[in-house]
Image (spheres, grey):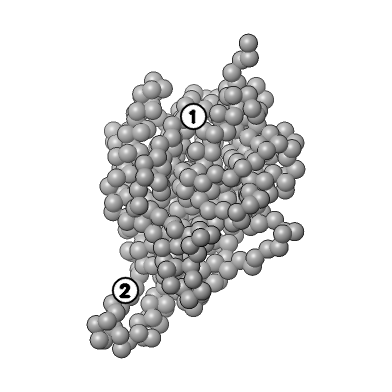
Amino acid sequence: MQMTSKPVISATGLFTPAETITNEELVESFNRFVALHNEQHADEIAAGDLEPLAPSSVEFIEKASGIKSRHVLSKEPILNPEVMEPRLPERGNDKPSYMTEIGVKAAMQALEKAGRDPADVDAVLCAASNMERAYPAMAIEIQQALGIDGFAFDMNVACSSATFGIQTAADYVRAGNAKSVLVVSPEITSGHLNWRDRDSHFIFGDVATAVLVEDEAVAPAAHWDILGTKLKTVFSNNIRNNFGFLNRASPDGIGKKDKLFVQEGRKVFKEVVPMVATMIMEEAERLEIEPTALRRMWLHQANQGMNRLIAQRVLGHEASEDESPTVLDTYANTSSAGSIIAFNLNSDDLVAGDTGVICSFGAGYSAGTVFVRKTA
């Protein structure tokens, strides 16, 4: 009789782009765009045929989100009022994609931490909110670049992609189909952001994370037991991106807005907070974990207010920075990578026996929880 393997998190990796955009830089650029737009359309605005664009401010951004800066792969074009989007030259078929390049860097860091060679890995999942190329899959590119003999595929559940990827990897290990699986989340979210929209131009940044999920039998002594995972999706139009090969933006830009990130922020806040808090508490109960005993919560880094309220509902009091660490202020929203960044940067200080939850939530609506306990 075959014994069921026990999946654990052996290590994580993080790649951070060198370039940053502060709120001050972003606001200065955005307001130049607003002034130029209003000047060019002065007659229409005066006639009442067009509403003038409103400027942004550092105070508005920080109050709305808690974000102070973000990392990006292509800074100068984003801050150019006549461009306002990343410009990364398209690469030929003989060159790795940008997602592969940064994903490999995060993956190699995770492998190094675990003392693992790429040859030890059986599978690669590229779990991210957008894929740079349709096929071959980004995951297969990453697999090839790392020199892994196994299988790979892409998966997209927007901001929950990484946690959905972790459960998928854990299921492969549990079923005996793999002993070592890399979940790589290269999130170049600056590319799907409308940098000309006052309500959202500050939200996203670029990053790549990696999570190495393995059979406990081959994992290093210092690892994180995966106590349980829970996934949930509920359809909603309140966070959307309509870009696709059948409905790309036209050359003149008509219809472009809904081919980028759009959301009804207040509705998302109102509907997602109770959904996620309830999900965490119900899963904790199933696992016989007292929610108030959670040592740390690594939540999706989308909005400071959402995280504060979710943590408060779960813990029964307003969470401290130690209980629910924030990376949103310096990384901004990095889609599925956010909770993994928080875990990667804020987990080494925990001791054996400490229990926590990695939680993501976003478009779909989608939400994923991964309850973990530190070993050695």
* Residue 189 at x, y percent in the picture: 51, 57
User: Is 47 drawn above or below residue 164 in the view shown?
Assistant: below
Badge 2: residue crowd in 10 Å (few <14, some 14–19, many ≥20) = few
Residue situated furthest left in the rendering:
48
Under mark 2, the amino acid is Ala
User: Is 106 drawn above or below residue 313 in the view shown?
Assistant: below
User: Is 250 drawn above or below residue 180 in the view shown?
Assistant: below
CA distance separating discs 1 and 2:
45 Å
Asked whether 131 or 340 is in front, the reply is: 131
Q: Secondary structure at mark 2?
A: loop
Residue at the image position 40 percent from the left and 46 percent from the top? 364
Asked whether 236 or 308 is in front, the reply is: 236
Q: Quadrant of the C terminus?
A: top right
Q: Can you see residue 123?
A: yes
Residue at the image position 56 percent from the left and 30 percent from the top? 170
Q: Which residue is mark 2?
A: 54
Question: Splitting the image into 4 quarters, where does residue 211 fall?
Answer: top right
* Residue 271 at x, y percent in the picture: 29, 45
Residue at the image position 63 percent from the left and 11 percent from the top? 1
Query: Could you tell which of marks 1 and 2 lies nearer the N-terminus?
Result: 2
Any mark on residue 372, and which?
1
Q: Can you see residue 357?
A: no
Any mark on residue 67, and which?
none
* Residue 291 at x, y percent in the picture: 35, 28
* Residue 112 at x, y percent in the picture: 68, 39
Task: Left or right? Give the position of 363 relative to 172.
Answer: left
Badge 1: residue crowd in 10 Å (few <14, some 14–19, many ≥20) = many
Question: Splitting the image into 4 quarters, where does residue 263 fall?
Answer: bottom left
